[in-house]
Amino acid sequence: MGTPGCTPHSAVFISHPHYMDTRTDWLDEDVKPPRSLLGLPDFGWSGVCLPYCDRIATEEDPWMLRMTEGSAPAALPSRTLEPCSIKPNQSQEPSSGMEGQMEERYLEQVQTMVVGEVLKDVDTACKLLNIASDPLDWSCAHVQKWLLWTEHLYRLPQVSATFQELTGRDLCSMTEADFRQRSTQFGDVLYAHLDIWRSAAAMKERCPPEDSKSETDDDSWSDVMCSYPSQPIHLWQFLRELLLKPHNYSRCIRWLNKEKGIFKIEDSAHVARLWGIRKNRPAMNYDKLSRSIRQYYKKGIIRKPDVSRRLVYQFVHPV
DNA sequence: AACCGGAAGT
DNA sequence: TACTTCCGGT
């Protein structure tokens, strides 16, 4: 399409009617490069899609393109998502011999990658939201968090209000029609996204984190970290978490000098939104977040660097 | 738009 | 206590 500023990734957008038709701008005001945003998921591809913001649909993920080009939207996301059993269901192309094998291997590789990424992204989101990865374990509050997150992810207007007082179990027992009933426009998106989480949780259970079943369980970020009771996270910890995942978040916050603990908030509104989601504070903004950072000045946790610069801060005690 | 710190609320 | 919310001023 000849839309100015469109990247090839736009294909992903366009393939999804909801985005173009009904997106509202309540979340978009601060979005810098349009393509830094999620490609919207292609729900048709074996139930696998990787919208997880900020990191997908970037130049670093060319395979995303290949996938979306090639895959004709199937009907609905499949209920389960198994890396080993997914077969490309569109082998109509009479690819023969070597070529066919190559292609099949290529597809398999891509699928394995995709599944791995999905799991990673769900895990990341779990950590960020501080909720369990299995929707069945969610309380009403967790459901609301997840909804907030999903709204953020897909740039949906606020839909969480229509899903109040539902536990994760309730949510899981709902059909797509039930979802549509609660949100005519976005019920299907939410349903599909929930399906991804359920599939991811099911997979996680089926083939738990392979190789290293080591005893270093304490700090490994599996269920313990994700699940609920842990004490509320501190803002400085949260910022560190984001900084430690440059692959995911470098577009909104990054180190300027990791050794000295100097970092820059590149997208203040985005960071504030993530913080708000994490703390369940929908009204969070940079004004408030920065006030909290300033509280750290006298506590000696964060300060302004010697030469004060806009949106640049420094951890007093770098790692 | 960011930065600052007081003051009050949760 | 650790923010969150609000705010008047830089």
Image (spheres, coloured by chain):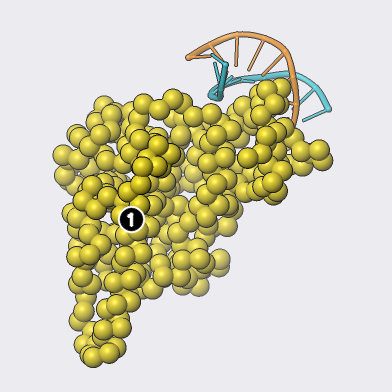
Chain colours: A yellow, B orange, C cyan
The number of callouts visible is: 1
Q: Residue at x 25, y 59 (%)?
A: A47
Give the residue displayed 25% in from the left and 62% down from the top. A83
The part of the image, by quadrant, that contains residue A294 is top right
Asked whether, in this view, residue A228 is left or right of residue A33, the answer is: left
Answer left or right for A91 relative to A237: left
Q: Residue furthest bottom?
A: A97
> Residue A270 occupies which quadrant of the picture?
top right
Of residues A228 and A286, the one drawn nearer to the viewer in this rendering:
A228
Tag 1 subunit: A
The answer to whether residue A169 is seen in the rendering is: yes
Above or below, A294 against A58 in this view is above
Please tell me which residue lies in front, A158 or A225. Answer: A225
In the displayed structure, A135 sits above or below A106; it is above
Disc 1 residue crowd, few under 14, some 14–19, many 20+, Cα 10 Å: few
Secondary structure category for the residue under label 1: loop
- Residue A179, position as x, y percentages in the image: 22, 42
Is residue A18 visible in the rendered structure shown here? no
- Residue A244 percent coordinates (x, y): 55, 46
**Place of residue A132 in the rendered image (x, y in percent of width and height, measured from the top left):** 32, 37
Residue at (38% x, 57% y) in the render: A117
Residue A161's image quarter? top left
**Circle 1 is placed at which residue position?**
A211
Relative vertical location of residue A241 with respect to residue A200 in this rendering, above or below: above
Q: Residue A210: where, in percent of width, then height?
A: 30, 54
Q: In the rendered structure, which amino acid carries the disc numbered 1?
A: Asp
Foreground residue, A166 or A215? A215
The residue positioned 21% from the left and 79% from the top of the image is: A91
Which of the image's four quarters has the C terminus of chain A? top right
Residue lying at the far front in this picture: please name it. Answer: A215
